[in-house]
Image (cartoon, rainbow, N blue to C red):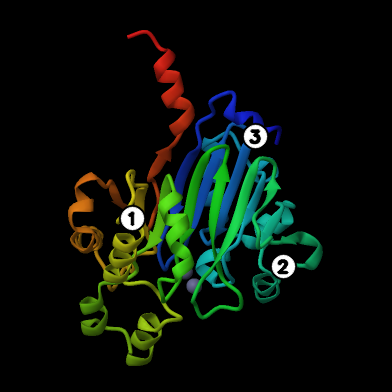
Amino acid sequence: MKNVANVRGVFVTVRVVNIGSGSSGNALLIHAAEASLLVDCGIGPRTIEATLRAHGLDWTKLGGMVVSHEHSDHIKALPAALRKGVPITCTPGTAMAAGIPVQAYVPIDRAGASFVDGVTVRPLTLSHDAAEPCGFEITVGETRIVVITDTGEALDHFTEPIRNADLLILEANHDERMLWNGPYPHYLKQRVASVYGHLSNGAAGELLREALKASETLPEIWLGHLSETNNRPDRAIATVRQELGPLADSARIVAMSRRGGERWASGRTPSRQLRLLEPG
Ligand SMILES: [Zn+2]
Ligand SMILES: [Zn+2]
């Protein structure tokens, strides 16, 4: 990885690809020029490798990986990543619970640090039944990508990163009515709905409304970690739009697919400048 700090000057585009999202597995690729980063690897290694290949990458060319927590839907391909020596950053609690050897990871810096050149990762503490889970505010050049999933509660410190995001990946795990009327055993319903469980569509919408009420520009919003049993993509989007009220008119909201496929490209500041230089 060379100089992504210089990326500002050369108008690089930051690309984000959903490799998979949901209780069955989560992985995200962030890719900009020579900076590349995986966020979680809860999908089979072959699927991840196919996405890497499509972007001219493989495990050894990957700049690094951040791991949110040790649940299997976030670390399925961890053995493959460790075998290939992918630089990893996560909290010490996650490293211990996921069995990541001390020498194979860098403890995530609370203040935000560049563990992949030019990419800054700041952890966001989550409320979830894992050892030491965290979401991420990831800055590449001037582009901010915020990932908040696996949290039973919308915490105050989510507000600022959400407001500053260009792309926001936010959990909308379940529709509350579908969860309570659904087939899960009672203890599991309680776990999902608890403050250490997962964010509902309604709670995600409320959080967005509060965080974005004074914002002039909205991030693109990807709703993630949807439950296959207790949610529907159209329902998640509709509930969040309803909570957002008038703000929803100018919001682009996407429900992330379990099997991945959604893509986003930034280049916000740089491409705007480029456009100004273009004739016509
Ligand atoms: Zn989890
Ligand atoms: Zn999860």
**Closest to the observer, 97 or 172:** 172
Front: mark 3 or 2? 3
Residue 172 in view in this figure: yes
Can you identify the residue that label 2 sits on? 100
Q: Is residue 211 above or below residue 199?
A: above
Q: Which residue is at a point 31% across and 68% down the rendered structure image?
A: 228
Q: Position of residue 165 (x, y in %)?
A: 44, 49
Q: Which residue is drawn at the image coordinates 22% and 77% (left, top)?
A: 178
Identify the mark nearer the N-term, 3 or 2: 3
Identify residue for label 1: 212
Residue type at the position of mark 2: Ile
- Looking at marks 1 and 2 on the same chain, the residue that comes earlier in the sequence is marked by 2
For the residues labelled 1 and 3, say whether their Cβ atoms are less than 8 Å apart. Answer: no
At x 53%, y 44%, the residue is 30
Q: Indicate the quadrant containing the C terminus: top left, top right, bottom left or bottom right.
A: top left
Residue 76 in view here:
no
**Residue pushed farthest top?**
279
Q: Alpha-carbon neighbours of circle 3 within 10 Å: few (<14), some, or many (≥20)? A: many
Q: Which residue position is annotated with label 3?
A: 4
Q: From the viewer's perspective, is 118 left or right of 44?
A: right
Lower position in the chain sequence, tag 1 or tag 3: 3
* Contact between labelled residues 2 and 3, with CB atoms less than 8 Å apart: no
Where does the image place residue 25, in percent across and percent down from the top left? 46, 63
Identify the amino acid type marked 1.
Answer: Leu
SS at badge 1: helix
